[in-house]
Amino acid sequence: MEFYFLGPFMFFIIIGLVFILLKCVIVVHEAEAIIIESLGKYTKTLHSGFHIITPFLEAPRPMLKIEKKAGLDGKFYNALVQSDRIDLRETVYDFPRQNVITKDNVTISINALLYFQIINEKKALYSIENLPEAIEKLTQTNLRNLVGQLALDETLVSRDIINDKLREILDRATDKWGVKVNRVELQDIVPPASIQNAMEKEKKAEQDRRATILEAEGIKKSAILKAEGEKEAAINQAEGEKQAEILKAEGIAQARIIQADAEKEAIYRIVNALADKGNPAQYLIAMKYLETLTSITSGENNKIVYMPYEATGVLSSVDCVKQMFNK
């Protein structure tokens, strides 16, 4: 009976000892931290490694954090959960899409990504009640303020400026919470459908205008090149004609020089041949006269044959030539 009674009792004692042992031992992973409280008062912060605490007197303090959970529709949503372990790694928080009014009273839809990291576990736990919600509300409020200072066109082309300004504001505001905001990224900026249609029409009109300008510039350059080509061709043609005329004139001049030299040589020989036999001048005049007379009477339509008034002198010259050759 005693063994039968001690068996269940020992079993419960062993179970209790195991439970107490599990409560005493805490293993903290790398890049994690656990806040330990003793009777509701902060005692210490446990970092990576093996730790032993006093059971029932010391206990971890849970902290709210955001986790992705699947909904009934299969999509993932942000959910707040409590956890004893504080993640010290960089965390990305995808903010839900929100409507923001620009400076020119246009309502646009924006969603953003926030990358932050807890650098002081004690401040993150005790300085703010709900750290994820506080960061979300702070980001949304400052995003509205920044976008409200810009027009729609400025907002669409100033993402980097908005990101930098928003990161700087959030980093200063969350410093007292032990949080470091590394960067902020605007994912989508969606204007209303009517604005999108107007922007598409404006973009198409701008593209058509650029196409027209490019086409006109192409036609202009083509006409300029064509005119320059025609000008160069005309210059080259004129230069060629000029060179041809020069060469032709030089050829005629050289031919005349050669002909003159030949006539000079012929006259020189005639003069030398008739030096002792007669007057060379009369011979040359008679020959030129006969050549001229021949050209005058050589035409097909020349029906009248006449003898010039000076024919007797020419005949006398011819007679003199005949006598010279007879000698």
Image: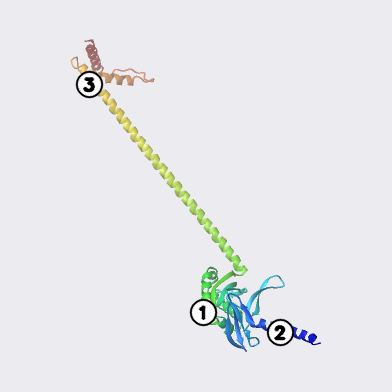
**Quadrant that contains the N terminus:** bottom right
Q: Secondary structure at mark 3?
A: helix
Quickly name the residue at label 2: 16
Viewer-side label of 1, 3: 1
Task: Say if residue 287 shows up in the picture.
Answer: yes
Residue 185 horizontal side relative to residue 55, left or right: left
Examine the image and state in which quarter residue 14 appears: bottom right
Q: Quick one: 221 or 191, which is closer to the camera? A: 191
Mark 1 vs mark 3, CA separation in Å: 119 Å
- Percent position (x, y) of residue 300? 39, 20
Q: Quadrant of residue 288 in the image? A: top left
Tell me the amino acid under the disc marked 1: Arg
Q: Position of residue 205 (x, y in %)?
A: 56, 61
Residue type at mark 3? Tyr
Q: Assign a secondary structure to mark 1.
A: helix
Q: Is residue 237 left or right of residue 181?
A: left
**Mark identifier at residue 21:** none
What colour scheme does the image use?
rainbow
Which residue position is annotated with label 3?
268
Which residue is label 1 attached to?
A: 172
Q: Nearer the N terminus, badge 2 or badge 1?
A: 2
Residue placed most toward the observer, 254 or 192: 192
Instruction: Count the marks.
Output: 3
